[in-house]
């Protein structure tokens, strides 16, 4: 009787171990998000005014703002 219980417990652990090993090989591939917007379309330029030689570059992806001016 004890031998049968021992064999059943060992069999259950063997099935659990085998299942864990098989599930370990089934790693789903991680989804890589591809940026559909080219780098040239990320930056947008806005002028400060009609006769003002200052422009602002705005990065639509990160929110970064750069001030540009002409040196006269």
Image: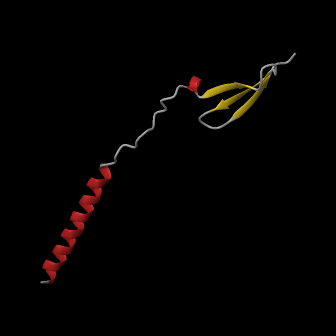
Left or right side of 23 for 40: right
Residue shown at the point (16%, 74%) measured from the top left: 7
Q: Quadrant of residue 60?
A: top right
22 above or below 33? below
Decide which of 50, 26 is in the foreground and name it: 50
Decide which of 66, 45 is in the foreground and name it: 45
Decide which of 54, 9 is in the foreground and name it: 54
Residue 33 placement (x, y as % from top left): 45, 37
Left or right side of 36 for 24: left
Q: How many marks?
A: 0
Residue placed furthest toward the front: 50
Q: How is the image coloured?
A: secondary structure
Residue shown at the point (16%, 79%) measured from the top left: 5
Left or right side of 4 for 55: right
Residue placed furthest toward the bottom: 1
Residue 17 placement (x, y as % from top left): 27, 62
43 above or below 27? above
Residue 34 placement (x, y as % from top left): 46, 33
Q: Quadrant of residue 11?
A: bottom left
Residue shown at the point (25%, 64%) measured from the top left: 16
Q: Quadrant of the C terminus?
A: top right
Residue 30 placement (x, y as % from top left): 40, 43
Residue placed furthest toward the top: 72
Q: Quadrant of the N terminus?
A: bottom left
């Amino acid at each position: 009787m004890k031998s049968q219980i021992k064999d059943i417990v060992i069999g259950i652990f063997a099935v659990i171990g085998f299942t864990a090993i098989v599930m370990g090989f089934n790693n789903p591939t991680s989804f890589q998000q591809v940026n559909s917007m080219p780098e040239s379309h990320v930056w947008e330029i806005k002028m400060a005014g009609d006769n003002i030689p200052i422009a602002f570059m705005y990065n639509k992806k990160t929110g970064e703002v750069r001030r540009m001016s002409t040196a006269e």
